[in-house]
Image (spheres, rainbow, N blue to C red):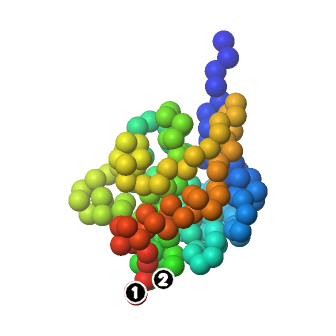
Amino acid sequence: MVTAMAYTGKQFEEDFKKSAVQAEDISIDRLYDNVGGYAGVKNICDFIVYRYPHQYYFELKSHKGNRLPFSEITEHQWSGLLEKAMKNIGCIAGVLIHYSDHDKTVFVDIRKLEEMKQQGEKSIAVDYALANGVPLDGRKKRVTWEYYLGATWFLKLVKYAKAGGVTGGKS
């Protein structure tokens, strides 16, 4: 009996990076991650992407099940992403979640997650994320993914941020 390999967080990050490198008009930086925050290394996210005129901060999470618990996002990541989003004009920060049981990937702004947390929520369901975030389309290979990180997706992110009044900073 052959079982499908789990789609790990590291594979998700690798697939995202490979897809981003192929995209036009973006600059992507992968922040060093030593798995566990040892030796004083603590990053607020996995990737920083620039596409004129916006800077994006992406924390990637691959999760089995219907709900991503907020506890999967460290307090350092949460507060760092929130600070970037709230204090800097043109910054969009949040979590890019791959729900592996559903083969769905969606970006949710950290301010939307903070609003949920303030309302007492402890996790984000796949259906809620899809209805209140920006899905990232892709093509599944056997285990890995190729994501469509073109201009259209980034424009959707900007429209999403503006529609929710979450473009960052003071105007």
- Note whether 116 is above or below 44 in the view shown: above
- For the point 37% across and 49% down, the residue is 131
- Note whether 106 is above or below 7 in the view shown: below
Q: Which mark is residue 89?
A: 2
Asked if residue 167 shows in the view, the reply is yes
What is the tally of numbered marks visible in this picture? 2
Q: CA distance from mark 2 to mark 1?
A: 6 Å
| x and y, in percent, of residue 144 in the image | 69, 39
Disc 1 on helix, strand or loop? Answer: loop
Q: Which residue is mark 1?
A: 170
| x and y, in percent, of residue 35 in the image | 63, 56
- For the point 59% across and 78% down, the residue is 53
Residue type at numbered disc 1: Lys
Q: Which mark is residue 141?
A: none
| x and y, in percent, of residue 132 in the image | 37, 54
Residue type at numbered disc 2: Ile
User: Does 142 sit left or right of 90 as displayed?
Assistant: right
Q: Nearer the viewer, residue 167 or 79?
A: 167
